Amino acid sequence: MKIYRDYTQAQLDAQYEQRTLVPDVGPYIKNWAEGTAGAKATLRVHMDIAYGDYADERLDLYRPDQDAAPVLIFLHGGAWRLLSKDESGYLAPVFVEAGAIVAAVNFSNAPAASLDTIAAQVTRAVRFLRENVASYGGDPKRIYLVGHSSGAQLAAVAMQTEAVAGAVFVSGAYDLEPVRLSARNEYLYLDEAAASRNSPLLNLQPKNPRPSLPPAIVAWGGRELDEFQRQGGDFADSWEIQGASVERVFLPDANHFDMGDAFADPTSRLTRAMFDMMDLV
């Protein structure tokens, strides 16, 4: 029986399980954790800055020497249930060296927190940084919101209310109805209403007091699951339909986890596109 589009239940479950793409995701996570530890050891960093009242609502801020720097807010992936800011600072050396502040944001994971709660935390972090980053040498008018995987979905939800200078969405799912129908919902507990309000693909239409959409980069890899490639293309199209500029970055040889690695490669097409957006060298 078809559950969604032309997928049976087993096929849909497989389309939303990225771990089938690689023999072992462990080496990727290990590299991100070690890269983050290295960044903390070598860069100017303010750790565990509270942006809210709960223990999970913390962020690490990696700084260049100069002030009035553009600010990259990074939201990690992990299928809404894994990872933290301790695996999110690995891209800091590349962007700090180029003159940007990198904010690695921590937030709660499912199933301990609902997706509504997690999205609210991310929105709170963006607002906190807009109001306070100047005291850390950042330019609040040049904030760029960046997310990978489930972090891309969270970034896109935050964009429904928050104004930033630009946004980067990498390998995300932006319509959560197929996620709700898949095995992912065994820990997300989404009903139809929750899936709808957390689906930025369905909520891009202008609404007050949501700001106009900024320039965006939407990226995905050629070795990703078909559904993630489809969702990336559909989301880029919807962003463009709203009258905002969008750059599509397609890395033909990259799987879902390689796309996360691309942030730390100063020569990758994704990083170069981000440098151009942020006016970095």
Image: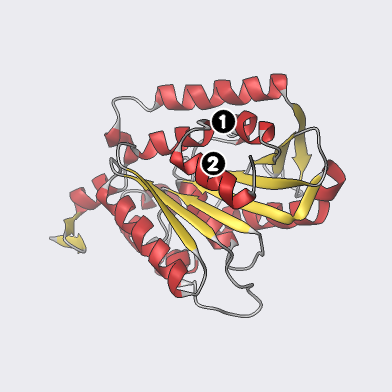
Q: Amino acid at mark 1?
A: Glu
Q: Residues within 10 Å of mark 1 (few under 14, many from 20)?
A: many
Q: Residues within 10 Å of mark 2 (few under 14, many from 20)?
A: many
Q: Quadrant of residue 106?
A: top right
Q: Quadrant of residue 222?
A: top left
Label 2: state its secondary structure.
loop
Q: Which of 276 and 179 lies nearest the eye of the viewer?
A: 276
**In the depicted structure, whether residue 114 falls above or below residue 199:** above
Q: Amino acid at mark 2?
A: His
What is the C-alpha distance between the residues marked 2 and 1? 8 Å
Q: Position of residue 57 (x, y in %)?
A: 70, 45
Which of the image's four quarters has the N terminus? bottom left
Q: Position of residue 173 (x, y in %)?
A: 40, 55
Q: Is residue 128 visible?
A: no
Q: Residue pushed farthest right? A: 135
Can you identify the residue that label 1 sits on?
87
Label 1: state its secondary structure.
helix
Q: Which of 278 and 107 lies nearest the eye of the viewer?
A: 278
Q: Is residue 153 visible?
A: yes
Q: Position of residue 79 (x, y in %)?
A: 44, 44
Q: Which of 169 and 141 lies nearest the eye of the viewer?
A: 141
**In the depicted structure, whether residue 269 falls above or below residue 219:** above
Can you identify the residue that label 2 sits on?
76
Q: Residue at x 63, y 49 (%)?
A: 278
* Labelled pair 2, 1 in contact (Cβ < 8 Å): yes
**In the depicted structure, whether residue 281 falls above or below residue 198:** above
Q: Residue at x 68, y 34 (%)?
A: 96
Which of the image's four quarters has the C terminus? top right
Q: Which of 212 and 59 lies nearest the eye of the viewer?
A: 212
